[in-house]
């Protein structure tokens, strides 16, 4: 593999890791895709996925330092986590059957419609009752799309955001959810794409950026009120949706 200790590659990778860690600290899990385009400047998507797989786990474990069990929506996680495992298994099986580009476009379009409808409706949190069926569908869809299109955030957000959870509970719940997902995904990623000694060294170089990024994001989270945080989350969904549509259409 081509990634080594080139100063440009190292600088871009550290910046991407910091940005993704920041997103996890500020908004919980599910928005890592916002930082991934930085890595596309210096390496191909498969290399980026393999390099980030162990780093995601490190980020999640650091983030859980801030998102304690008191911030987890346990009634939702009881359904979401088993569904996530099922979804990852289905997504792994479907990798050789479905075109990931079509999956990315479909998820992107659904997410875009969901976010735009919220803004057109006034952009205010309007809590709805939870649903076991919707949670199961969301968890399964998130597991599938995280394997097929590298973005499990939108399906989970489409379920959780309308619940109007307190901002710290939303962040803590998504953080734990993606900690479980990334732990499961790390093994197949590393099995498929063995990392070189240089790349393990590059990952070690990135480690200090993780607690710094998570802490900076968490500090922002503490300063945002509930309404503003939700508006940012929905705006981020628009960004993620457009990114998925672009990747799916361009084969990126």
Image: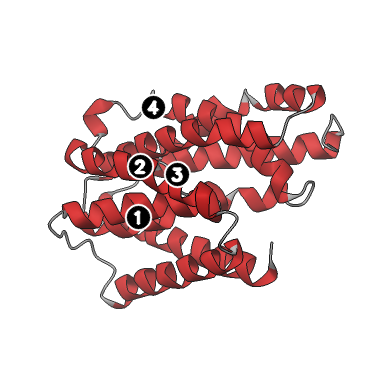
Select label 3 or label 4 by which is in front. Answer: 3
Q: What residue is drawn where x is 57% and y is 60%?
A: 97
Q: What residue is drawn where x is 67% and y is 28%?
A: 206
The circle drawn on residue 157 is 1
Tell me how far mark 1 sits from mark 3, CA to CA: 21 Å
Query: Which residue is the site of mark 4?
Result: 64
Q: Is residue 187 above or below residue 9?
A: above
Give the class, few, some or many, for how many residues have Cα within 10 Å of label 2's Cα (few <14, many ≥20).
Answer: many
Tell me which numbered mark, 2 or 4, is placed earlier along the sequence. 4
**Is residue 14 at least partly visible in the picture?**
yes
The circle drawn on residue 89 is 3
Left or right, 176 with respect to 75, comes to right
Residue 80: x, y in percent? Answer: 28, 44
For the residues labelled 3 and 4, say whether their Cβ atoms are less than 8 Å apart.
no
Query: Which residue is the site of mark 2?
Result: 174
For the residues labelled 2 and 1, say whether their Cβ atoms are less than 8 Å apart.
yes
Tell me which numbered mark, 3 or 4, is placed earlier along the sequence. 4
């Amino acid at each position: 593999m081509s990634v080594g200790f080139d100063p440009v590659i190292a600088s871009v990778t550290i910046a991407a890791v910091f940005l993704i860690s920041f997103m996890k600290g500020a908004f919980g899990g599910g928005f890592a895709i916002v930082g991934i385009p930085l890595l596309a400047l210096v390496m191909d998507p498969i290399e980026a996925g393999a390099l980030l797989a162990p780093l995601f786990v490190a980020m999640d474990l650091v983030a859980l330092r801030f998102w304690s069990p008191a911030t987890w929506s346990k009634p939702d996680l009881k359904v979401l986590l088993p569904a996530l495992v099922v979804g990852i298994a289905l997504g792994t099986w479907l990798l050789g059957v479905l075109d990931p580009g079509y999956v990315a476009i479909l998820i992107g379009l659904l997410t875009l419609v969901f976010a735009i409808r919220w803004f057109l409706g006034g952009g205010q949190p309007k809590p709805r009752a939870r649903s076991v069926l919707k949670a199961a569908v969301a968890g399964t869809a998130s597991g599938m799309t995280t394997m097929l299109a590298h973005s499990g955030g939108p399906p989970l957000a489409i379920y959780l955001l309308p619940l109007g959870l307190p901002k710290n509970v939303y962040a803590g719940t998504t953080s734990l959810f993606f900690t479980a997902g990334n732990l499961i995904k790390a093994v197949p990623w590393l099995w498929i794409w063995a990392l070189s000694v240089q790349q393990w060294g590059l990952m070690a170089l990135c480690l200090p950026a993780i607690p710094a990024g998570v802490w900076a994001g968490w500090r922002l989270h503490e300063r945002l009120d509930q309404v503003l945080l939700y508006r940012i989350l929905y705006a981020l969904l628009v960004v993620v949706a457009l990114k998925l549509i672009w990747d799916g259409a361009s084969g990126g």
